[in-house]
Amino acid sequence: MIKSLFPQSMLNILWLIFLSLFLFACASKPPSSGDEQLAMIDNKAITEPGIEPGIILPKPKEKAYVHNAAIKRLINRAKKMTEQERYDSAIQELERGLAIAPNNPHIWQNLAMVRLFQGRYLQAEQLANKSNALSQGDSNLKSINRQIIISAREEAGTN
Amino acid sequence: MSRKRKVQKKRRFGIRFMPLLSILLLGLISLLFYAIYLDFEVRKKFEGARWEVPSRVYARPLDLFVGKPLTKADFILELKQLRFKNSLIDSPGNYYTRSSSVYFYSRPFKFPEEATSATRVRVDFDRNIIHKIVNLDTRNVIDLWRLEPVFIGGIYPKLVEDRVLVKLEEVPKALVDTLLAVEDRKFYEHYGVAPFSIIRALVANIRAGSRVQGGSTLTQQLVKNFYLSSEKTIQRKLNEAIMALLLEMHYTKDEILEAYLNEVYLGQDGRRAIHGFGLASQFYFDTAIENLKPKQIALLVGLVKGASYYDPRRFPERALKRRQLVQTLQYKQAIISENQYESQLKSPMGVSKNKPSGVSPYPYFLDLVKRQLIRDYKPEDLQTAGLRLFTSLDPITQYKTEKSITKRLKILERDARLPQNKLEVGAIITDPGTGLVRTLIGGRKFRGSGFNRALDASRQIGSLIKPIVYLTALQQDKDYRLNTLIPDDPISIDLETGESWVPENYDKIYHGDVSLSAALASSFNAATVRLGLNVGLDKVIKNAHRLGIESDIQSYPAVLLGATQFSLYEITQAYQTIASQGFKTPLRAINTVATDTGEVLSRYPLTVQQAVNPEHAYLILNAMQSVMTEGTGRKIYKDFPSSFKVAGKTGTSNDYRDSWFAGITGDKLAIIWVGADDNSSIGLSGGTGALKVWKDVMLQTKTQSLSLVAPENIDFVNSSLVMHQSGEKVCLENQVMPIVSGVIPSESERIVCTND
């Protein structure tokens, strides 16, 4: 049907345009969000044929941080303690979690929140930054961390 | 006689006795004042800090959860450190194993803010991981269970005393009855002194021809122990009597008895005095006071008369005879039945072989604890208030580290043809994420409390400084990436003295252009000095301070090769910052300080402060992995699987005086130093010395592989690297290399491997 609507020459031009766009898109592929998964051998991606040096590769799949029942229990207990303004106890519970899962960005984020409630604004910001460094691109986590940092700065009067 | 003469006689009579009366009156008044003074002393001592109770220090409590990497053997090690007995779990403090499960009966423990009760638990292991935890009382599955922490020592007052405080209600009735039967039958009736008891004792002693009964009441004995020295003068006896009466006036019988039970001298362990039945039951029978059997009670009560003279370990025959005397009294007073008396009279004493040491098995770690406390507490408070300190020490890791070190040092000495005990060692192991100190070794004599090499030995760190130099370069991310070629070429630096310094590589060869990560991996000196001077020596020094080094660093080029001295503790702090995504996380040995009633005095919470950007920390850690896969640390892969990841750095100082290794794995940052106290050459490099110690420790503790988390602004590119492998320069293509986002190498910077 398309063929009947357009002359052959025009179709050729359209194909050419489409092909160039495709090649252009491939050549300047934006950094992946980490969703793409490549087969892994020793944390090195098997490069697809044709990927040139200098081109950004998809991020290797990270080992998931520990977030098991024990951690969830500790985080929940810390949250309850925070509600009761038992901030030091909440920190201790979260630190117990860190001994189990030091790379868990949720624990670091919760620490940041407790510090925020305690009025320890500098630490709140630092801990939120630490959570970000471990967030592996988790946008929800990062968004909350951003809020914590903004609140901390506002409260501290540095904004 | 006339009236006048009678009156005169009376007056003369009165006058004659006046001086006597005045003296008497004066005497009475002085006595009164003296009594008031003694009264004040008695009350002051008895109340408040009744006796000097040292602070009790605990290791980290072991948290059990499903999925925890822990072997059954290591769990049993922890239970043994907690003095659990391998037996049926019919009472707290016992455990047994069946196939891959461990059944135990936990003891109750008062954590700050939370008390755990005695519970029967089963832990199932699946190879090296906890598979399941079950509460045997409720049959519920548990996701998190905290064991009581191992007691690791006390911070004692100078007199080196120790106490295990017991309340009267915790003491078995048989013990109280036996004690009163032997020492003070009329305790509840007298007023502190019992004159008839004195007479009775005198008679009994004359009859027996030796001292079989004491005339002192328990109150008097308490006063003697508490307040007075052991001279046997009349004045002391008088003081003792008055103070005993005063004590009885102010305090109840039960209070006095309780104080006595905790105060009485019952033995000696080197410099440590054993006071009180609570401690004595642990010291002689490795048992808690509430579990004492009647024959054990008899032995302990017998010791009251003379703990050294009747020491069951040194004079077993004497001790047994004394015990039998007491047992006879127990029977006569119906404290034990005829059956018990007959069956137990001749039974063995059962004194434990192990003298549980109150002096810490971890003096070097305790040293760090004390130093960290001194910031917050007066020294007197630490040694007198009976605080409970909850620390970060991991007794399992500490034990395995000590074992590995002992073995390996002997081998190193043998292989390097060094005299025995020439080599000394220091080691610190921390949690990379949180800075908690899990193990501290201050010297190869682990129980010694001399020079703490981990904290106080200031030694040249050699190549251990290099990651800081390369990190500084990587921070200039537009100029330096992991694959950037840098020259390992000769360089001559003019010194202020007029001489020239020409840094040489260990193999005396210059290697030309190599990738930045390769220069670190192979620890090339010339390349490092060139790089450091290019990026700025002062910037490197500033970074060192930012990372946590507090000592002054002189601004000399030789600093770039570690010709500067730091303590192991300081360099650990710097590596800790790198390992924690660039966030400076101060090393901590203490978690919480609480009173003996559970009130929290101080917590030592985690604080972080960004020192370098996470992406730069990531890059240097990546380069430090190359140290292990391609560089000076690669020999570890004889013992580790090729999939095992670790970021590390070897370090050797001038003339092979110091051998260092710093390693970061998934669960441990460990830095090892090996050297000689007299700073002489030991002929060992970082790779041939400290690295081997590190390797042994990591294998023993089954450390986890490193899993670095790439921060958001790290991208990965396909690149070529010019490396050194097995002594040869090679160009490796198709290497996945991390870079800081937005700093994509341009065409002209692409490294293409050519075949020339």
Image: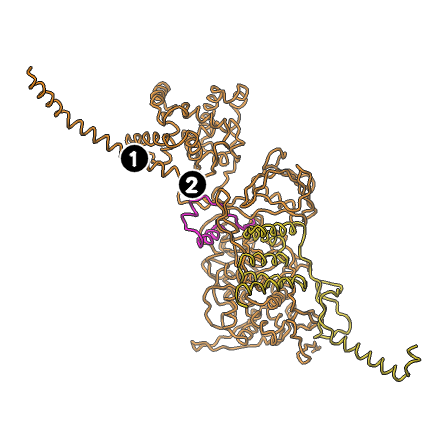
Chain colours: A yellow, B orange
Q: Residues within 10 Å of mark 2 (few under 14, many from 20)?
A: many
Front position in the image: B436 or B495: B436
Estimate the x, y position of residue B63 in percent, counting from the top left: 61, 47
Q: Quadrant of residue B616?
A: bottom right
**Vertical arrangement, residue B468 with respect to residue A4, above or below:** above
- Quadrant assignment for the N terminus of chain A: bottom right
Q: Residue at x 58, y 63 (%)?
A: A151
* Type of amino acid at the residue the image marks with label 2: Glu
> Quick check: is B271 in the magenta stretch?
no
Q: Secondary structure at mark 1?
A: helix
**Vertical arrangement, residue B416 with respect to residue B73, above or below:** below
Query: Which residue corresponds to mark 1?
Result: B36
Q: Residue at x 50, y 31 (%)?
A: B169
> Quick check: is B392 in the magenta stretch?
yes
- Quadrant assignment for the C terminus of chain A: bottom right
Query: Mark 2 touching mark 1, by CB under 8 A?
Result: no
Which stretch is magenta? B365-394
Q: Quadrant of residue B713?
A: bottom right
Marked residue nearer the N-terminal end (2 or 1):
1
Front position in the image: B168 or B63: B168
Estimate the x, y position of residue B293 in percent, counting from the top left: 53, 28
**Label at residue B180:** none
Estimate the x, y position of residue B594 in percent, counting from the top left: 49, 46
* Type of amino acid at the residue the image marks with label 1: Ile
Query: Which residue corresponds to mark 2?
Result: B161
Q: Residues within 10 Å of mark 1 (few under 14, many from 20)?
A: few
Q: Residue at x 36, y 39 (%)?
A: B44
